Image (cartoon, helix red, strand yellow):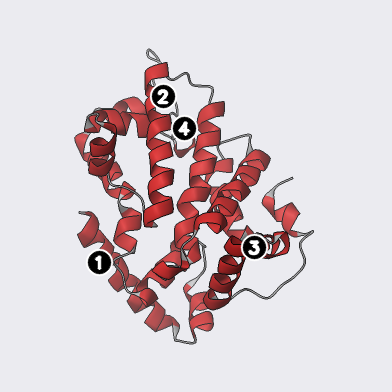
Amino acid sequence: MNGQIYLQNVPELDKLTTKETYTLIDQYQENHDPMIKERLVIDNLKLVISMTKRFYQKSEFSQDLFQVGIIGLIKAIDHFDTSYQLQFSTYAVPLIIGEMKRFLRDNAPIRVSRTLKDLAYKVLKYKDEYITYHQKEPTIDQLVQHLHVSRNDIIDALLSTHHVSSLEDQLSNDEDDLKLVDSITLNPQQMQLYHSHLDLMNALNQLNVKQRKIINQRYFLGMSQSEIAREMNISQAQVSRIEKKAIELLHKMLN
């Protein structure tokens, strides 16, 4: 059963506003009312489905990915700090993806050395703890400082968890059993790009509220400019200009 089928059995409810989401999360964290948790999960199911679609086309685990994505969503509901005034989805996406990547890593057919697997576990565990307390992902340098290992070791450990993002895909080669991760590891420019992407969530937090909301809706929720314009009660041209400016700022911060 994939996410779209599951949605057919979910009642049609009005989308919660940011203020309503904050209120319900605060209430749930105080009293752990299962009805409130269910309402928040239902309101964010499309977010889980959107993340599932990023992975399932290269995996036979679409149903499992959706289910572990829900686990990530619930973790986000449990730990989101409304005092930071971030969009809930900005915080939830890394946790949802983290659960999916962890599942795929544990079920990947490619064997990873025990040492690398242990380090990957420590990296992901620390990332989860850091996100919980700081509402953003740690940088590579912070991971190096905390775990007392080299940058290359951290990067290799992170790469070992990305099977579905094509890093473990076979390359066309008649003689060798070559994987894409092998070529990336040896390419400094590609490694730098990957490093920059790890800091994306930190960069997003530097945008203003309107820029961050539009980037989140466009690239995390998959909404069109016209849909965003209607929701924000502005023109599509304004959405386009704000999006373009936000992307320019992100490029500057990530390069």
Quadrant of the rendering where the C terminus is positioned:
bottom left
- Residue 177 vs 79, above or below: the answer is above
Which of disc 2 and disc 1 is earlier in sequence?
Answer: 2
Q: What is the CA distance from the residue labelled 1 to the residue labelled 4?
A: 30 Å
Question: Is residue 32 found left or right of 93 in the rendered image?
Answer: right
Task: Tell me where residue 137 appears, x and y as whole percent.
Answer: 36, 50
- Determine whether the residue tagged by mark 3 lies in a helix, strand or loop: helix
Which of disc 4 and disc 1 is earlier in sequence?
Answer: 4
Q: Nearer the viewer, mark 4 or mark 3?
A: 3
Res 249 label: 1
Q: Mark 1–mark 3 contact, CB under 8 Å?
A: no
Q: In the rendered image, which quarter is residue 181 located in?
A: top left
Q: Which residue has dot 4 on it?
A: 163
Q: Residues within 10 Å of mark 1 (few under 14, many from 20)?
A: some
Q: Mark 3–mark 2 contact, CB under 8 Å?
A: no
Q: Residues within 10 Å of mark 2 (few under 14, many from 20)?
A: few
Res 118 label: 2
